[in-house]
Amino acid sequence: MNRNSKYRTGEYISGNIEYFTAYTLVDITDTSVFDPTAGTQFEQAQNLNAFLQAISLASQPILTSVEKITAADLVDFDFGSSFIGDHNVWILRFATERMGTTTAAGLVRDLDGLPVYDNLDETVTLTSAVVDTTGATTLNTYFVRNDNL
């Protein structure tokens, strides 16, 4: 069989991409560890999986990346007013292939109250082991729509 195309399946996506960033104080480190006996690394991976599964309620996230900022001054972020000082912040960047299927407001609704593992590498004390996207003082996760990753 002779193939003259320079493209193979899976090497391209549609042009209607939307980009989002999640900022969180919940440890969502991408450890890629799926062995429940691995302790903290497994729990970090499960937190990330929970985020991605909740995001998937509206649209399949693609092109995901996770970054951890150590000792970030929270005055530069929009977390709840009870979180002050320098703390670890995780940034989840992702794209959705279909424009309009995901919104920042929809992400707030879908992730609020999501149970997570805590007492991992967070440097804040969460009031409860859940994602909080609505509390004025306890908000530990928020979303921003971007023009690019």
Image (spheres, helix red, strand yellow):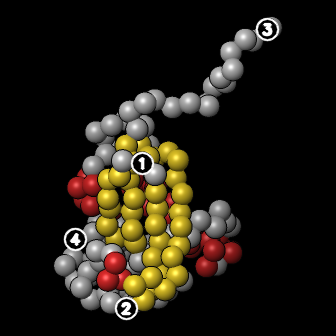
Query: Under tag 4, what secondary structure?
Result: loop
Label 4 to label 1: alpha-carbon separation: 25 Å
Upstream in the sequence, badge 2 or badge 4?
2
Frontmost of labels 2 and 4 is: 2
Frontmost of labels 2 and 3 is: 2
| Most distant residue in the right direction | 1
Label 4 to label 3: alpha-carbon separation: 56 Å
**Residue at x 38%, y 33% (from the top left corner):** 16
Query: Under tag 2, what secondary structure?
Result: loop
* x and y, in percent, of residue 13 in the image: 51, 31
**Number of residues whose C-alpha sits closer than 10 Å to that of mark 1, classed few (under 14), some (14–19) or many (20 or more):** few
Q: Which mark is residue 134?
A: 4
- Nearer-the-camera pick, 124 or 113: 124
| Most distant residue in the top direction | 1
Q: Which mark is residue 148?
A: 1
Upstream in the sequence, badge 4 or badge 3?
3
